[in-house]
Image: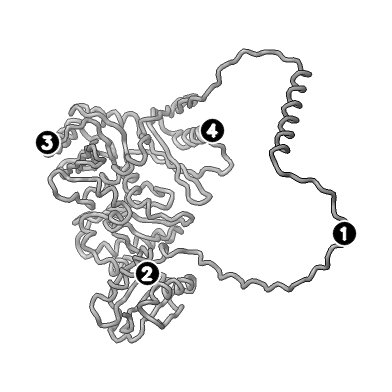
Amino acid sequence: MIYLYIDKNQVKLLSAKKSLFGQYSVESYEKKFQVDLLKNGTVANVDILASAIKEILQNTPSVKDKHVYLILPQEAFHFLRTEVPNDIATPAIDSFVKDKLRTTFAQNTGTLFYDYFFIENGPQKYISLFAIEAAVATKFQETVKLLDLEVQAFLPETLAFFKLFEKTLRVGKVENILYGKYEKDYFFTYLFDSFGLLEEQKNEYKLGGAKKIEQILKARGEELEKKSRKINRLILSGPVSDTIRQDTFTKEAGMWTNPLKKIILQFYDEYVKMLLPSDGKPLSLLEFDVCLGAFIFSVENKDFSPLRRTYATDTLSSEPFKARPQLKLPNLPSVLIPKEILLFIASFIVSFGLFSLVGKTNIRFSLPNFQKPAEQIITPTVEPPSPTPTPAFTREELKIKILNGSGTRGKASVVKDVLKEKKYLEIVTGNADNFDYKITEVQVKKSKKEAANYILEDLKDYTQQPKVSEDLSEKELPDVVIIVGQDFK
């Protein structure tokens, strides 16, 4: 399968050919062009785009597949997201979506190709629908047809990005998440939450001059917070993201930063191991993130494609859904039997069953005993101890910052490795304000005070009596700060 990503002036290709052993031989290639290939999400010029794709294919001569997953910018699609009422029956979902389509895209005239899927988190369920205009889709199909290729499915880049961190989401917790791509002179973000894409707008920034990316992100975070959309974390991708220092970047950007490369290697390692580059060089995960996300999405969601359903926005009576087949029982010949005979047969079967059951069991019947009951001795019961309240969060949810104050190099990394074995996920390290800490200190927020019990239990073999305080400001990004002292073994 070919995963072909087309942006305004860039094309990326990832080819994945499955072997008999379940692995994939992959080839990848990308190039930026001087001319615009797309304009407002649609083909600027069919011949120019076909020539650009042809050049990419010529640089991957061993790619013989003809089926293409075409990954396009979000602006190529119409987007609809809506919550599904809990009391709506499954058969009524199609009609529910149809009504939403009619009201949302009433101003459009023409035909839409679309598909949708559900995302559940706790009691809530949302539909995310992506549609592409038939005229736009036709232009892309004409382009690849000139190269003897066939579009298997259209995929928005936002779906590919969401798939790359979907496994890090926690059930019952709704987060606002920025996905950012950091290149040398360019940066963009999309806004997601735990149910998928939240805003379809792509925020783009040209880098250079005095303004740093951290300042851009801090301003963006403050802007969203004013709209009651406080960012819980930033997923940072792109080639330059591999050079950042997580703890200092988190502090300067004002939002908890998760480098995408760490997420992929921790949560999607099985997919990375499946992909074997034909040239022996490891696949650039941060350069081809959108292609990797599309590959994972296509493996896990084989049936999704905006080409599956059509909707004519200028025809109110159009039926965008194909009727789902229903199983029908064959018609059997009917035979009339008198009611009295049916009652006799039924009573005979019930009686026979009861006698058989009694005969096969050791049931004994006896008269009730009317003797005076023995006096009961009442023994006072001891009330069980009141249960210790269970924290409303898990180790995986805690954000931890480890600072080395021991004076021994690498001590913070040692503590990080210990905690990672205990299933903590979000950890950053750094140095304390000095290296004269005799005793290890654990600082927690009052809202997460139970976290101290976790930390003390998990570090009891390394430090005996750490200093614990609950004076960590609620405005701090981490929930727990551990300052490693000289007592840490």
**SS category of the residue bearing label 2:** strand
* Sooner in the amino-acid sequence: mark 1 or mark 3: 3
Question: Measured from the top left, where is residue 426 in percent x and y?
Answer: 35, 64
Q: Quadrant of the N terminus?
A: top left
Q: Residues within 10 Å of mark 1 (few under 14, many from 20)?
A: few
* Sooner in the amino-acid sequence: mark 2 or mark 3: 3
Q: Residues within 10 Å of mark 3 (few under 14, many from 20)?
A: few
In this figure, which residue is indicated by the disc labeled 4? 91
In this figure, which residue is indicated by the disc labeled 2? 400
* Sooner in the amino-acid sequence: mark 4 or mark 2: 4
In this figure, which residue is indicated by the disc labeled 1? 371
Q: Residues within 10 Å of mark 2 (few under 14, many from 20)?
A: many
* Sooner in the amino-acid sequence: mark 4 or mark 1: 4
Q: Report if the CB atoms under discs 4 and 1 are less than 8 Å apart.
A: no
The CA distance from mark 1 to mark 2 is: 70 Å
Residue type pointed to by label 3: Pro
Q: Quadrant of residue 380?
A: bottom right
Say if residue 143 shows up in the picture: no
- Depth check, front residue: 275 or 353: 353
In this figure, which residue is indicated by the disc labeled 3? 61
Q: Is residue 392 left or right of residue 460?
A: right
